[in-house]
Amino acid sequence: MNRLLFLFLLLGVHYVRAQAPVLSPLQVVENFVSPHGFPAKKQHVSGELMGERKSDTTLGQRLPARVQRKVRLIAQDTTFACVAVCLQDTANSIDYYFYLRKKEVWSMYAIRTLSGIGVVKGALKSLDSIPPDARGKKYAATHSHTWEFERANTVLFLGSDSTLKAHYLQNRAAFAKLSHSFLQPPYKNQSDSVLATAFGQKKIRKQTDKLLIRSVVTDKNSTGSLLFLLGGTGDNRAGYLYQPDRTKVPAISPRSYILIEELGNGWYLIKTT
């Protein structure tokens, strides 16, 4: 009888282990950025993050306690997921993007954030150093935009994802009107060089300036996609993508579009690298 009881208990333990819930991508990242540690970390890192297996601490434990961590799921299918983490204290906020793949469990294999932020912060500092009496017509006469546009655009570019999303939501009608302008002749299905000429049209320039859009370009790998960019350096850009056909929206990847987050009505918040 005791032997039968022992075997039953042993089989029961194995059954419980086999049925242990697999952590979701969101839960994996939440544990990794938590200040309380992640005992199962080694099972959930791979690729570029293999070095984390040698560390006794996690990213969350290495961050100052004052840093707030806001985690949200961006995308997930059966084998791939992207999770965003906003790290924020009283002075700064920065968004990171974690990429996970699933074999037996979900594992984090890459992390990205928008590069070149230091350069943009330097540009903001330079703008603020310009004397007030040199920020009006005098500035506009030697620059392609007004001082007010440059500063507002730069502040928005440096903002968190939630700030960028709020900008779209507060101006969605104006964004719809702007996209309509670029989907009509002479700009529909044209090259980037032709789209650039639109900024010489007062009507369109008034719309882009209001929305703090610095340029409009196409995505050559996604037919019909328009990128309304706030700015950036090199391939590191941030802005909004318009693509009414969901099947043609580019894929999220740590190698290109590090963020694509749906905003509604064919619009997406995007960041690239």
Image (cartoon, rainbow, N blue to C red):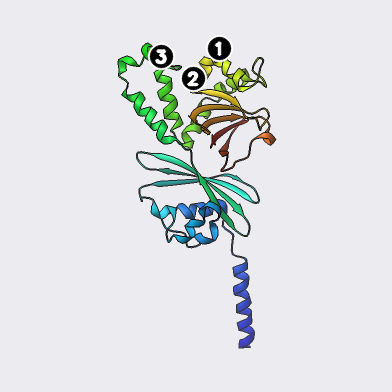
Which-is-in-front pick, marks 2 and 3? 3
Secondary-structure class at tag 3: loop
Residue occupying image coordinates x 36% and y 12%: 138
| Residue under label 3 | 142
Image vertical order of residue 8 relative to residue 260, above or below: below
The kind of residue on which mark 2 rests is: Lys
Q: How many angstroms separate mark 3 from mark 1 (CA)?
A: 19 Å
Q: How many angstroms separate mark 2 from mark 3 (CA)?
A: 20 Å
Residue occupying image coordinates x 63% and y 36%: 250
Whether residues under marks 1 and 2 lie with C-beta atoms below 8 angstroms apart, the answer is: no
**Counting other residues with Cα less than 10 Å from the Cα at mark 3, is it few (<14), some (14-19), or many (20 or more)?**
few
Q: How many angstroms separate mark 1 from mark 2 (CA)?
A: 14 Å
Secondary-structure class at tag 1: loop
Residue occupying image coordinates x 35% and y 40%: 90
Labelled disc at residue 261: none
Which residue appears farthest toward the bottom when viewing the image? Answer: 1
Quarter of the image where one finds residue 139:
top left
Q: Is residue 151 left or right of residue 167?
A: left
Q: Earlier in the sequence, mark 3 or mark 1?
A: 3
- Image coords of residue 34 (percent x, y): 44, 54
- Image coords of residue 45 (percent x, y): 53, 56
| Residue under label 2 | 210
Image vertical order of residue 246 relative to residue 182, above or below: below
Quarter of the image where one finds residue 142:
top left
> Tag count in the figure?
3
The kind of residue on which mark 3 rests is: Thr
- Between residues 76 and 145, which one lies in front from this camera angle? 145
| Residue under label 1 | 201
**Counting other residues with Cα less than 10 Å from the Cα at mark 1, is it few (<14), some (14-19), or many (20 or more)?**
few
Q: Earlier in the sequence, mark 1 or mark 2?
A: 1
- Between residues 258 and 212, which one lies in front from this camera angle? 258
- Between residues 24 and 48, which one lies in front from this camera angle? 48
